[in-house]
Image: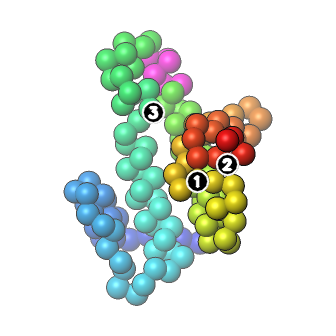
Amino acid sequence: MYPIRFTKQRAVELLDAIANGRSLPAPPGGWTISELAQAAGALFTAALSHGPPSRWDDKEKFEGLHYEHQELQEERLYDDLHAVIQYHSELHFAVQDGEYDGSFEEEVTAIIEHDSETQATKVRPLAGFKSQN
């Protein structure tokens, strides 16, 4: 259970900043947990609105897929994005706790996938993982 405070005015302000490539404006009262959560929601909305990677990698191919296959990829996107955000959070914690440099290079690339059957997150390292070198 987690309480929220959402304001339409703030949502419009955040979504407008994202859509127009501007920095997210700091809220008048500073970054409270509630403000961070609303900003995260706005960023998640923006990410979801781009659709699954297969859509932006090759839009024609994606649109040529049978409707059920498109729908499946759209449904998986929600869980995959949550997994991506959680993995980014883990990397941020590693930076904050001074543990990042022991395991990672400056830039990390990976494929993140959430398995809805097992509820496990799969991380496929592509670059920047020191254990990979």
Q: What residue type is labelled 2?
A: Lys
Task: Say which of marks 3 and 1 sits in front.
Answer: 1
Residue 2 in view in this figure: no
Q: Where is residue 88 in the image (x, y as percent from the top left)?
A: 57, 55
Q: Nearer the viewer, mark 3 or mark 2?
A: 2
Q: How crowded is mark 1: few (under 14 residues within 10 Å), some or many (20 or more)?
A: few
On residue 105, which mark appears?
1
Give the label on residue 130, or none.
2
The kind of residue on which mark 1 rests is Glu
- Give x and y (percent) for residue 76: 56, 33
* Crowd rating for badge 2 (residues with CA inside 10 Å; few <14, some 14–19, many 20+): few
- Residue found farthest to the left: 20
Residue type at mark 3: give it.
Pro
- Could you say which is closer to the camera, residue 128 or residue 88? 128
The range drawn in magenta is 67-72
Quarter of the picture containing the N terminus is bottom right
Q: How far apart are marks 3 and 1 (CA)?
A: 27 Å
Q: In this view, does 37 lie above or below 133?
A: below
